[in-house]
Image (cartoon, rainbow, N blue to C red):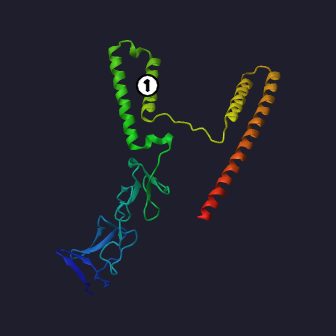
Amino acid sequence: MSPKVTCNGATCLIASSDLISGHIGPLFPGFKYILTPNPDQVPCAASQYQPFTFTTDGNSQCVLRKSLCKSSGQILAHYGNSSTDASCRCDYRQNYDYVITPKDPCSCKPTEEDCSCHIRKCDYDKRLKDNKIRQKFNTEVKNRYQVLREIDDNNENMGENITEIWDNIKDIYTKTAEKVLGLKNRKRKQWLSDKTWENIKERKAIKIKINAAKSNRLKTKLQSDYRDKDKEVKKVQRMIGETMLKNLQMKRKKRQSVESSV
C-alpha cells in the first residue's frame, strides 16, 4: 500500500498510519523515519527527543520537546541527545540554589525531578558565596599581594625568613576579611541579666582553675565550687525566664483585649 506523505522538496515526512511497502519496522529510541524517497532513519530534531521506540502510526516527528531550562535562576547543564531530555541546574554565580536538592546538583532532570530555583540568602559565615562579595574579596587580596611583592623586591633579605613570609600571607587574608566581610557582632541575649553574666564568668574562672589544678584535693574542692556555682546560674536564669514569660503573656492578653474592644 502506498503511504500518505507530506513532502518538502526531496524529503518527505511520514504522516499516516498506512503501512509502507518494504517497511523495516519500528526504530530505536532517538530516531524517526523520513522518505528520501525511500524510508531512512534520522535522529530527532535538536529541540526534540524520543526516549522510546518510534513508530509511523500517525507520527512524523519525535514526540517530546526538550526542556528549555529558562525558569527563574535556571541555566542549561547538558543539552541531552536525540533520546534524552536536556538537564538544568541553578545558577550559583547569581546566588541561586535548588528549592529541593536533586540527586545530582550539577545536572537536574526536569522530567524526573523538581528543578525549581530560588535566591539563597547567605549565612554570615558563607558570605563569600555571594558573587559580588567574592569578587571584591579577590580584588582586595590581589592588591595586598602586589604591595607585598613590591616590598619584597625592595628588601633583599625579605624572602629568606619563611616564618615572616607565612605571617605576611596570613595577615593579608585576615585584614582583607575584616575589611570586606567585617566582624560579626555578637548580640547579647535579652534573657541573660547582668547578674547572670557575672555568675557565668565566675563559673568559667573556676573551670579554668580545675584544669590547671595539680593536686587531687584542690581539684575536688574546685569541682564542688563549680557545681554550686552552676546550680546558682541555672536557678537565677530559671527565675528570669519565668518572669519574662509572665510579662509576655500579660502583654499578649492586653493586646487581645484591645483588639476585641475595637
Task: Indicate whether 74 appears above or below 148.
Answer: below
Q: Residue furthest front?
A: 261
In the image shown, does 114 or 34 lie closer to the viewer? Answer: 114
Taking depth in this image into account, of 114 and 242 the one nearest to the observer is: 242
Q: Residue 120's x, y, as percent?
A: 46, 50
Furthest residue to the left? 9
Quarter of the image for residue 23 reads bottom left
Q: Position of residue 15 (x, y in %)?
A: 28, 80
The answer to which of 53 and 152 lies nearer the viewer is 152
Name the residue: 44% across, 28% down. Answer: 175
Label 1 residue SS: helix
Which quadrant of the structure image shows residue 155? top left
Q: Amino acid at mark 1?
A: Ile
The answer to whether 243 is drawn above or below residue 148 in the figure is: below
**Residue pushed farthest bottom?**
1
Which quadrant of the figure contains the C terminus?
A: bottom right
175 left or right, relative to 32: right
Left or right, 103 with respect to 249, comes to left
- Asked if residue 153 is positioned above or below residue 220 in the image, the reply reads above
Residue at 44 percent of width and 40 percent of height: 128
Question: In percent of the image, x 44 and y 55: which residue is there?
Answer: 118
The count of marks equals: 1
Quadrant hosting residue 147:
top left
Q: Residues within 10 Å of mark 1 (few under 14, many from 20)?
A: some
Q: Which residue is mark 1?
A: 169
